[in-house]
Amino acid sequence: MNKLRIGLIGLGTVGCGVYKTLEHIDNVEIVKVAVKNLNKQRSVDVPAEMLTGDPYEVVNNPSIDVVVELIGGVNPAWDYISTAIKNGKHIVTANKELLAKKGEELFNLAEEHNRVCLYEAAIAGGIPIIMPIKTILAGNKINKIQAILNGTTNYILTKMDADGASYEDVLKEAQQLGYAETDPTGDVEGFDAMYKITTLATIAFNSRVKVENVYREGITKIRKEDILRANELGFKIKLIANATIDENNNADVRVHPMLVPKNNMLAHIDYVTNSVAITGHPIGHIVLSGPGAGEFPTASSVVGDILAIAREFNTTDYLLPMMRCHHHSTANPVKIEDTYNKYYLSITAPNAIGVIAKIGTICANKDISLSSILQKGVEADNTAEITVITEMCLEKKIREVVSELDNCTVNSIIRVAN
């Protein structure tokens, strides 16, 4: 039996998981592994002759059939992958940023050289989502995605909820436990989820979504008071990657915190778990959930892609046609100010007669109906926190309301999930 010969670029947490898993698979052989630091202690024992500090020894090796890229980022990963494709190698990657920023160029290059690029691990770790969309769900017209795609932010929001703690305190704890990076910007400001929903929406909608058109807002402004008030109103706060498309190819794709009703399954996805809810026809509504990161969950998706290539390798001149890029259109971006949403507003206002009436009047003048308005107690400085939940309204109108709330401080504006 001819073995599929693999070159790995990157031997971090996921790379070690891939190496350990492939050791027990008979029809695959790891030939070369490129690492940044040859002397680093790792959880796998790799023969010295298999290691190299030069990734070009992997991508230029004529005996390698598949290059597995696990280092992340755009540069130098793009140079390695593009060189490998030009050298006739198939690609498996977990690189969500590269896919979001250079996906079109990557898949065009792969098709030009008749090579496949698989990326199941790039979206939701161990949750199978790309292959199901491209195969078993291929007959569906998917028009909506709501997903929790970042374990770090989900862990922070869950701990804030469970412990009644502040964002700053939980972030510090998450960093100590290794759930958050020393520089957590990529996670807490929503970049990670933005990259993932860009590619996921492109695949699900069969129309290319540009990452620069995806609205992004992180969780750094979420207060423990917002978590508490959301609970009282029947919601949980989650960082949601949201994408919808209409019959005219207008795509509204964004990442931001949302109040999720407690009767919605996503409200109960806690800690580092990820989940993807898909709506379409004829499937209706389905939810997939599981580990969104980690050594073996992510390795599971990477190895699954490798074995998909192995099954067809040397059996056809055109491998895995269903898994290739078939996008011939680009979605029309919908700007966030043109979207319709329900909103949660936390407002600190003077404890004076007519303040609540004034808020209601300003909203009414903007054609905004209120679902609820609540004041609880008065502070020592004679101010009160007023919580407002609106009905569906235009984003630009809610911004106008905020600008007209004189003598009031708007502490939080959070969209509410449908």
Image (spheres, helix red, strand yellow):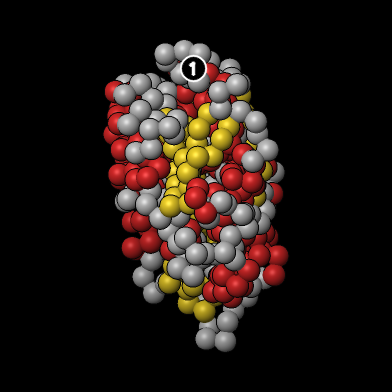
Q: Residue 209 at x, y = what percent? A: 35, 35
For mark 1, give the secondary structure: loop
Tell me which residue sits at (66%, 56%) in the image.
271
Answer left or right for 303 relative to 112. right
What is the count of numbered marks? 1
Q: Residue at x 43, y 52 (%)?
A: 52
Disc 1 designates what residue?
314
State the quadrant of the C terminus: top right
Relative to residue 185, is residue 13 depicted above or below? above
Q: Position of residue 400 (x, y in %)?
A: 33, 56
| Res 319 visible | yes
Apparent side of residue 48 relative to residue 330 in the rendered image (left or right): right
Is residue 42 depicted above or below 10 in this figure? below
* Farthest residue, direction top: 316
Residue toward you, 163 or 290? 290
For label 1, the crowd category at 10 Å Cα-Cα, with few meaning under 14, some 14 to 19 and many 20 or more, is: few
Residue at point 45%, 47% (across, down): 9
Position in image of residue 326 (x %, y %): 38, 21
The residue most toward the front is 49
In the image, what residue occupies the spot 50% across and 48% down? 50
Q: Amino acid at mark 1?
A: Asn
Q: Quadrant of residue 277?
A: top right
Q: From this viewpoint, which residue is outermost toward the bottom?
A: 380
Decide which of 405, 186 is in the foreground and name it.
186
When the figure is inspected, residue 38 is found, relative to residue 87, above or below; the finding is below
Quarter placement of the N terminus: top right
Residue 126 visible from this viewpoint: no
**Residue 381 against residue 185 in the figure, above or below:** below
Query: Which one is in front, 2 or 15?
Result: 2
Residue 414: x, y in percent?
49, 56
Q: Is residue 328 left or right of residue 20?
A: left
